[in-house]
Image (tube, helix red, strand yellow):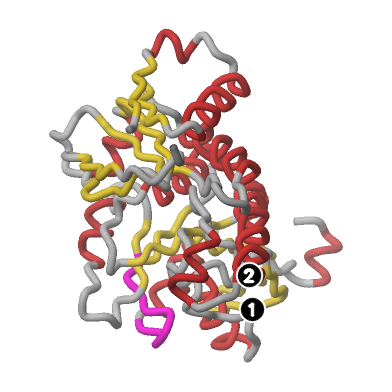
């Protein structure tokens, strides 16, 4: 069974960067899908990717990384990139072994949940 | 310019050109295309198996002459950036042994870390986008966002236009308001002159 946690913007802002990364990775490694209100900036996302790479495991059951999706809250602009820069709304971080992205076009994010991770 | 440098002639500008992007977007193919075209050299090995480039490859002193301007380039081919690496995929999809797969995955994780670090050390970034896929991938946004924050000039290369399913117009619509977008085929060299022109403009 999958679990979803929504972390409020206020709660996320109280955490320093390292604590935030640790919190995200610890939860995702347990199979939780995280929704971070306010999102992660591109620099924060590369910091997170760095730490995810260091946590990847090569023994069963293994942690193979994350799906990382950011969503934006103003679909009125024609340029996806322009609105993505300025209107970051929330970021989803999910274990890649549990989640398959079916659709992500910044209007609809559709995720398929698998039950293969973590093993029961 | 100093008197001495005036006497010695114009000093040729050297710039490092980074090839950045997702895994299997065609970074090494494009780097090879440019290096072969301008200097008869290759930068790295190309493979259909993901994460073929697991270490940064550099080729120095590639001379670009375009519209009367000279540029001394260092081509920096970075490993692909991703958020996930599952060694089992190499076994299932590419027939590698478990040992080969784990080794490749370990090297690939180090490659991603290195690629992110190297984003700080390039003068111009060519962000290679596979135009046969929707350009809304988070990795492209993360790379471009980081480069913008560092103030590094960006050229988006909408690659693989030789394929029927390519949609470079969508890549242009996505990024064109902010950055140069060049539809290109790294494989065939189609539109490479336009890329050279944009590199010169960006320096």
- Location of residue B162 by image quarter: bottom left
Label placed on residue B43: 1
In the picture, the disc for residue B75 is: 2
Subunit bearing disc 2: B
Up the image or down, B158 lies above or below A5; here it is below
Q: Which residues are magenta?
A: B182-190
Q: Position of residue A118 (x, y in %)?
A: 45, 39
Q: Per the image, is A12 magenta?
A: no
The label nearer to you, 1 versus 2, is: 1
Instruction: State if disc 2 and disc 1 touch (CB < 8 Å).
Output: yes
| Quadrant in which the C terminus of chain A is drawn | top left
Please rate how many residues cluster around mark 1, counting C-alpha atoms within 10 Å: few if below 14, some from 14 to 19, many from 20. many
* Discs 1 and 2 lie in a common subunit: yes
Q: Position of residue B139 (x, y in %)?
A: 43, 49
In screen coordinates, is B85 left or right of B121? left
Q: Main secondary structure of the magenta part?
A: loop
Nearest to the observer: residue A6 or residue A45: A6
Task: Say which of B163 and A6 sits in front.
Answer: A6
Alpha-carbon span between mark 1 and mark 2: 8 Å
Instruction: Give the residue drawn at x 51%, y 41%.
Output: B146
Secondary structure at numbered mark 2: strand
Residue drawn at point x = 51 percent, y = 83 percent: B33
Closer to the camera, A56 or B33?
A56
Disc 1, SS: loop
> Residue A26 location, x and y as percent?
55, 28
Disc 1: which chain? B
In the rendered image, residue B187 lying in the magenta stretch gets the answer yes
Q: Residue, x 31% and y 37% (percent of image)? A: A84
Q: Nearer the viewer, residue B185 or A68?
A: A68
Q: Position of residue A98 (x, y in %)?
A: 37, 43
Q: Quadrant of the N terminus of chain A?
A: top left
């Amino acid at each position: 069974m999958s679990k979803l946690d929504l972390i409020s913007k206020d709660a996320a802002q109280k955490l320093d960067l390292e604590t935030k990364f640790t919190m995200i990775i610890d939860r995702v490694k347990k199979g939780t899908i995280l929704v971070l209100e306010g999102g992660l900036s591109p620099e924060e996302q590369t910091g997170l990717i760095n730490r995810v790479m260091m946590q990847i495991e090569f023994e069963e059951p293994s942690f193979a990384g994350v799906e990382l999706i950011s969503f934006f809250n103003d679909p009125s602009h024609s340029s996806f990139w322009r609105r993505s820069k300025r209107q970051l709304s929330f970021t989803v971080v999910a274990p890649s072994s549990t989640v398959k992205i079916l659709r992500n076009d910044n209007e609809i994010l559709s995720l398929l949940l698998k039950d293969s991770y973590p093993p029961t | 310019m100093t008197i001495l440098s005036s006497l010695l002639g114009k000093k040729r500008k050297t710039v490092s050109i980074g090839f950045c992007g997702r895994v299997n977007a065609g970074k090494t193919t494009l780097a090879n295309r440019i290096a072969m075209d301008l200097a008869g050299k290759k930068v790295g090995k190309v493979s259909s198996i993901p994460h073929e480039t697991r270490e940064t490859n550099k080729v120095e002193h590639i001379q670009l002459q375009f519209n009367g301007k000279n540029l001394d380039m260092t081509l920096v081919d970075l490993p692909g950036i991703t958020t996930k690496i599952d060694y089992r995929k190499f076994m299932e999809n590419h027939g590698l042994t478990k040992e080969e797969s784990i080794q490749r995955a370990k090297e690939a994780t180090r490659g991603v870390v290195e690629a992110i670090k190297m984003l700080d050390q390039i003068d111009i970034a060519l962000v290679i986008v596979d135009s046969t896929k929707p350009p809304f991938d988070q990795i492209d946004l993360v790379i471009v966002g980081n480069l913008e924050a560092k103030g590094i000039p960006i050229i988006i290369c909408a690659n693989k236009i030789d394929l029927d399913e390519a949609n470079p117009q969508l890549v242009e619509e996505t990024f064109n308001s902010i950055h140069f977008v060049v539809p290109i085929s790294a494989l065939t060299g189609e539109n490479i002159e336009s890329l050279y022109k944009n590199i010169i403009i960006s320096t």
